[in-house]
Amino acid sequence: DFESPESHVINWDAGPRTLPIKEECYSLHASESPYKSAVLRYKYSSLTTPWSTYETFLDDLTAPVLKKRTPVGGRFNPNDYESKRLWATSHDGVRVPISLVYRRSDLRPNQPTCLYGYGAYGISYDPSFSSNMLSLLDRGLCVAIAHVRGGGDLGRQWYLDGKYLLKKNSFLDFIWCAQYLKSEN
């Protein structure tokens, strides 16, 4: 949920539970758990955190236990990188989310940025870890993902607002995201 990055609400028999999330840009998927289990297993990744599997008790979601993490070669240290959620205003006043990641030590005005996005068929571009991105980040680039209309990032209406006669919104969203990033340095 792009609007509330601090937590993810899980509806359970005993009522809704809040799963604490510390990063603004992330991907979260429920994983294999027994049907009537008191344990929730989920997979988590962010632009700075490799895919990880956690387990937590549904009665107390405050202490997830790391079960497995995808290994990353080289001298990768997640504390060297930072990600954040930005919002650009498109041509028609609609706010478009941008996921941004950069190397903390390299952040400077007018930093080169690789912007990409995909807005078709209702497909979401989840902000998750990619070791391929490290090559760009370690060379001083920022990497940004424009979550443009036509994708499924903000639900069905977001997809429909970038389809057929409204397809131009996907392209204009991308352009306005680029202009926003340039103006904000």
Image (tube, grey):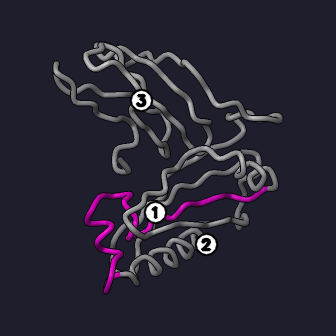
Decide: few, some or many residues near mark 1? Use Cα within 10 Å; few <14, some 14-19, many ≥20. Answer: many
Whole-number angstrom distance, CA of label 2 to CA of label 3: 39 Å
Using residue 173 as the reference point, say whether residue 143 is left or right of it. Answer: right
Decide: few, some or many residues near mark 3? Use Cα within 10 Å; few <14, some 14-19, many ≥20. Answer: some
Q: Residue furthest left?
A: 14
User: Residue at 56% of width from left, 29% of height from top?
Assistant: 52
Q: Nearer the viewer, mark 2 or mark 3?
A: 3
Relative depth, front residue between 148 and 164: 164
| Helix, strand or loop under label 2 | helix
Give the residue at mark 2. Answer: 182
Give the residue at mark 1. Answer: 147
User: Residue at 43% of width from left, 76% of height from top?
Assistant: 170
Relative depth, front residue between 102 and 74: 74
Q: Earlier in the sequence, mark 2 or mark 1?
A: 1
Whole-number angstrom distance, CA of label 1 to CA of label 3: 25 Å
Give the residue at mark 3. Answer: 31
Find out whether residue 150 is within the magenta segment: yes
> Magenta stretch?
140-166
Relative depth, front residue between 16 and 92: 16
Q: Earlier in the sequence, mark 2 or mark 3?
A: 3
* Residue 138 position within the rendered picture, expressed as x and y whole percent measured from the top left: 79, 50
Whole-number angstrom distance, CA of label 2 to CA of label 1: 17 Å
| In the image, residue 45 above or below residue 99 | above
Looking at the rendered image, the quarter that the C terminus falls into is bottom right
Q: Nearer the viewer, mark 2 or mark 1?
A: 1
Amino acid type, mark 3: Ser
| Helix, strand or loop under label 1 | loop
| In the image, residue 13 above or below residue 181 | above
Using residue 70 as the reference point, say whether residue 53 is left or right of it. Answer: left
User: Residue at 40% of width from left, 42% of height from top?
Assistant: 5
